[in-house]
Image (cartoon, rainbow, N blue to C red):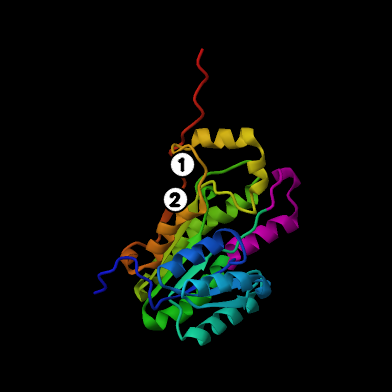
Amino acid sequence: MNNKFFDLSGKVAIITGASRGLGQYFGRALARAGADLIITSRNPESLESFKTEIEGLGRRAVPLQLDVRDYDSIQRMVEDAYNTYGKIDILVNSAGCNVRKPSLDVTWDDWNLILDTNLRGTFFTARAAARKMIPRKYGRIINIGSVTSVFGYAGMAPYCASKGGTKQLTMSLADEFGKYGITVNCLAPGWFKTELNAVLYEDKEWVEYICDRIPLKRPGKPNDLDGTIVFLASDESEYITGQTILVDGGITTGATRALPKK
């Protein structure tokens, strides 16, 4: 038995959507815990600086091309990842996108872009990785959801649908893959500033409103996710599966802005 909790030494993790944002924070956290990485992007050249950073932590990082909207691209990436390390222990399904606009303005193509990336891509990447995990009777699949996995917000209908679907997909795959020793969980961040939503944080009134609804009174910082991603990737979470774990500062308690004093 390994007496060092949350030790990922010797583990291999695939991180999708690793060219920016939370995907890179997930990769850093797993590497610091000892994992070697496969980092993916539609443009592998964009991963070179991140690769160098991970190698500076003493871990391997192999960039691979991946477009989660392309079935063949998913299969190639997983095969290349498996051939590189001889196994896949962990998958973090972090690739995602959003188009913010009122539902009345959402186009057919907007819907397809978001759902194909966030939900269909998550499913087929998880399935491809699971096929490599099943013979070893071991695996950790971590789908990245959102506070919108359980809450709905105006102007984000396709995104909310995709992340709600991710929560349900996680439970279904957990039930199906559990007999193979594979856990499937959903890490659902609350309000974290990323490139996808940076424009919102330019509105000071909106930031104040959100912070009033968060019991911890601030948006999330990317490192707030480190402990949860490492835990879900580790052997210490082996009896946890099918769960959506919200890292949201408590916003899903339903807290609301206090009424002004009279």
Give the quadrant of the N terminus: bottom left
Residue at x-position 45% and y-position 82%: 87
Q: CA distance from mark 1 to mark 2?
A: 8 Å
Residue 112 shown in magenta:
yes
Q: Are marks 1 and 2 in contact (CB under 8 Å)?
A: yes
Mark 2: few/some/many CA within 10 Å (<14, 14-19, 20+): many
> In which quadrant of the rendered view does residue 9 lie?
bottom left
Residue at x-position 59% and y-position 64%: 95
**Dominant secondary structure, magenta:** helix
Of 139 and 39, the residue lying toward us: 39
SS label for mark 2: strand
Task: Write the start and end of the magenta stretch as one range.
Answer: 99-121
Residue 169, given in percent of the width and then of the height, sits at 49, 61
SS label for mark 1: helix
Q: Which residue position is annotated with label 1?
A: 252
Of 247 and 181, the residue lying toward us: 247
Residue 177, given in percent of the width and then of the height, sits at 41, 71
Residue 239 shown in magenta:
no
> Can you say whether 226 is above or below 68 in the image?
above
Residue type at numbered disc 2: Leu
Q: Which residue position is annotated with label 2?
A: 246
> Can you say whether 19 is above or below 106 in the image?
below
Residue 29, given in percent of the width and then of the height, sits at 46, 64
Please tell me which of labels 1 and 2 falls first in the chain: 2
